[in-house]
Amino acid sequence: MTAIADQTGTAVTAALRTIDANIAEFGDRYPGDTTENDRYLERPANTGWTTSFWPGMLWLAHDLTGDDTYRKAASAHVRSFVDRVDQGIDLDTHDLGFLYTLSCVTAWRRGRDPEAKRAALAAADHLMRRVLPSAGIIQAWGDLADPRQQGRTIVDSLMNTPLLFWASRTSGDPRYAAAARRHTAQLRDHLLRPDDTTYHTFYWDPATGEPLRGETEQGSADESCWARGQAWGIYGFTLNHQYTGDPSLLAAAVRCADYFLAHLPADGVAHWDLIFARSGETAEERDSSAAAIAVNGLLELAALVPASLADHYRASAGRILRSLIDDYSTVRRPDSNALLLHGVYDKPKSVGVDEGNLWGDYFYLEALTRVTRPGWAHPW
């Protein structure tokens, strides 16, 4: 870790410079999901699944510097997330975990803001409404009266369950954690395939709870391996193991990690689908955000596995992060207001292809924080 940390000072300085400029540009408003020609534009309102990554970056900047300016800037976003849950704005998503962990749970942990706590618990209640009892899964997107959305979950949801574990610990009500445990077990058993790849999305029969089929929304094909989904698997199964102590979830994280690392190009930054690693040289785009997520998952996982495997994961994370800093970050791109470029949001729909994106920026900065602040505790 020391060797990695020695290489990141310039990257941290550049990231903080961009965040300072974005505070001036966006304030308590929100950048879009992705850049357009390498620059974020302001979105009209606090909607969508990615807005919390902006205050999440502000909390990380505070961790990196101790500068109270960042704490105040992060705390200023609580009001918007309180209003969002109170007014029922765009809550039809499992990504309430992303949204309220980084915006409100963190604000509660850091400053004991009672409104942040109330909003995060309300978001957890909304998330519980998406539980399908027959299957024990948290349904993914959209209006649950829509048959296309009933019985569907996605691999990203592994990162949303921490909100439920927090809600149980905070409220004393075990229902939240029980739902998270059952949901994660279903993903372990059905989204993680025998060859250690992951489906992006999987369906259960809404009436009987019978597992039906896996599909993709953003990968190359139903049976391919969407890179960001595999990275969510590394980090998400690791986090759920931390909450539950279930060794099968740790084993699932290891399986995801080993497959991911075995299917990378020479510079360590994944193509948007890992299937393209089989093709040798290819013009298919990289997904820097998948790489950034994987770095954090690998570093978190390394603390939980035997020493030889831990050393391998730490070395791999360092190699990927070094590549991100050198060739994918905006260290030498002051014209961009992103931290990380060359990401892919949704290639099949031609959305955010070869652009920066908010989650990539957040997880890149989380990785920099991990390696420059030993003992730092993640917000999940």
Image (cartoon, helix red, strand yellow):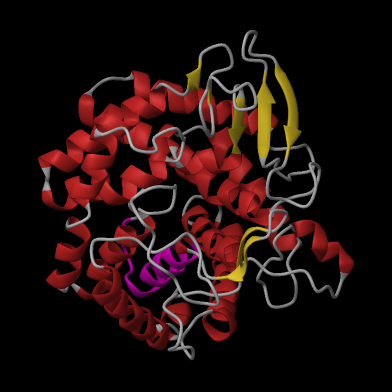
Left or right side of 241 for 278: right
Q: Residue at x 79, y 48 (%)?
A: 224
Q: Quadrant of residue 335?
A: bottom left
User: What residue range appears in magenta?
Assistant: 360-377
Name the magenta segment's main secondary structure: helix
Residue lying farthest to the right in this orientation = 279
The correct choice, above or below, for 246 with respect to 375 in the image is above
Q: Residue at x 34, y 85 (%)?
A: 13
Q: Quadrant of residue 192?
A: top right
The correct choice, above or below, for 67 with respect to 106 in the image is below
Q: Residue at x 67, y 72 (%)?
A: 268
Quadrant in which the N terminus is drawn: bottom left
The correct choice, above or below, for 315 with respect to 129 in the image is below
Residue 84 coordinates in the image, percent (x, y): 28, 40
Q: Is residue 364 magenta?
A: yes
Q: Is residue 279 magenta?
A: no
Q: Choose between 174 and 219: the one closer to the eye.
A: 219
Left or right side of 237 for 91: left
